Amino acid sequence: MNVTPLESWIVKRTGITHKSQEALRAYQLGKLCETLTYAKDKSRFYNARLNAIDVNAITSLEAFAQIPLTTSEDIKCNAYDFVCVLGHEVERIVTLNTSGTMGAEKRIFFTHQDLEATIDFFNYGMRCLVEESDSVMVLLPGPSYGSIGDLLKKALALSHIKCIVEGVLSDVDKTAQSIEEEGITCLVGIPMQILYLSKVKPEVFSKYIKKVLLSTDYVPDTLVEALSQNGQCKVFNHYGMTEMGYGGGVECECLKGYHLRENDVYFEIIDPITEKPVKDGVYGEVVFTTLNRQAMPLIRYKTGDMACFSHQPCACGTFLRTMEKVLGRIDNTLRINEHEIHLREFDEILLHFPDIVDYKLSLYTNNTLHVKLVCVNNNDSEALKKAITWRLREHLNFEFALIIDVTENEHSIKMTNSMIKRTIDNLGNKG
C-alpha cells in the first residue's frame, strides 16, 4: 500500500523537517497566528470580530479554540466585509445559494494565488487515484475560468493526464458517447449523478470506468457498493467546499477516510451544542480555518457537516491525520413522532434497491412521510413499493403515515444541473 501522495506534498509545502504531528501542529499554529493578524488588519468583518483578541496571546491550539466561530450567516450578511484585497486583485467570485431558497446568497472571493493553491492541491490529490495512463472526465461545473472543472483540468495537465470537462450531468447519452470515444477510465462527479449514470448506462460504466472520485455531497455506503461493481471499480471520496477553496481532503488507496490539506487548512471537530472540541473518534461538526488565503480568509468556519477524526493511524503508513467519511449535514433530519431520522438512514435503505436512481422525501403535517422514487423502470412498481414499505417500517419502528410514488426514469433537468446538496422537505413538522 502506497503512502498518500499528500504526505510528501505537505512536508515540502510546510518545510517541516520531521514527519510528525507535532511538527505539523507547530507549523499550523504559526500560520493560524499569521492568518489572525492578516484578517484582523485587512478584513472589516474580522477587524470588528477579533478586536478584543490579542494574537500574541494565542500560543497553543487550545488557545486558538477560544476564538469566536464564523458562520454561514456571517458570510451571507457581510460577504464584502470579509474581503482582504483590492477589487482588481479578485479573479473569481463564486455565488452560492446552497439552501435552494430565495434567501441571501453567499459570495466567496479568490485571488489568482488562491486559485493556484487549489490547483496545487488538486494536482497531488488526484495522484491518490490516477496516473498518466488514465483519462479523466469531470462531471462538475466547467470549463469557465476558476470553476472546479477548469482547476481540475489545469491540475491534471501538470501530471500529463488527459482530462475532459463534460460539465454537470444533463445529457446521459452524450456523456456515455464521450466516455466511449475518449476512452475515459476515471469519473469525477456528484454521487447521485454518477450512480444514475451507472444504472442507466451500466454497459458503458462497467466496460470503461475503473475509478471514481465522488465530491460535493454526502456519499452513502450503499452507493459506494453499487459503484464498485464487486471491486472492479475503485470509489474514492473527496471532501471539500467552495468556502475552503474547493479542496479539503481525499482518500488514499486504503479508502478509509480523507487525508487533509493540512498545509492550507486547519481542521477541528467540535460538539455542535457546546462548541467545544471533541476527542478523536467522536463525531461532531467540522470547523476549518484557512491558512494561506489572500482574498477571503475564514477563521473557525462552521461547515454544518458531521464527521470525526480517526483515532487509528492509516494503513497507508502516513503520519497525517485521517478524517472519517463525512456523514452528511447535521441538520439534514426530520422528526416524526418525536423520533429524529437523518437523510443518510433513508439513503442506506432506499438506494439499496437496484432500480432506484433517485428519490425525494417530504414530511407533511400529521406525521405523513411522502417518498417519491425515480426508477430505471417501473415494470413492477407495486412489488417495489411493498418491499420498500416493509424495509421502512422495519427500520423506523414507530407509527407514521407513508405515501410512496414511483416514476420511471424522470431524472429532472433541475436536479442534474444543480450543485445544491440534497435535503429533506420538512413541510409540516418543524419539531
Image (cartoon, helix red, strand yellow):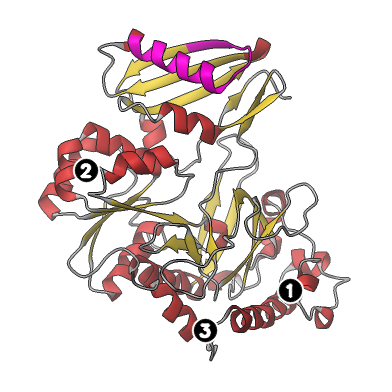
Residue 16 lies left or right of residue 67; in this view the side is left
Residue 35 lies left or right of residue 257; in this view the side is right
Q: Marks 3 and 1: in contact by CB < 8 Å?
A: no
Q: CA distance from mark 2 to mark 3?
A: 43 Å
| Magenta span includes 176 | no
Tag 1: amino acid: Leu
The residue carrying pointer 2 sits among few (fewer than 14), some (14 to 19) or many (20 or more) residues within 10 Å by Cα, namely some
Determine the secondary structure under disc 1: helix
- Return the residue found at the far bottom: 17
Residue carrying label 2: 175
Residue 102 lies left or right of residue 273; in this view the side is left
Nearer to us in this view, 166 or 104: 166
The x, y position of residue 378, in whole percent, is 28, 15
The residue carrying pointer 3 sits among few (fewer than 14), some (14 to 19) or many (20 or more) residues within 10 Å by Cα, namely some
Tag 3: amino acid: Lys
On residue 61, which mark appears? 1
Q: Earlier in the sequence, mark 2 or mark 1?
A: 1
Q: Nearer the viewer, mark 2 or mark 1?
A: 1
Q: Earlier in the sequence, mark 2 or mark 3?
A: 3
The residue carrying pointer 1 sits among few (fewer than 14), some (14 to 19) or many (20 or more) residues within 10 Å by Cα, namely some
Residue carrying label 3: 19
Determine the secondary structure under disc 3: loop
Region in magenta: 383-403
Relative to 139, residue 3 above or below:
below
Relative to 393, residue 103 above or below:
below
Q: Nearer the viewer, mark 2 or mark 3?
A: 3
Would you identify the image quadrant in which residue 34 lies?
Answer: bottom right
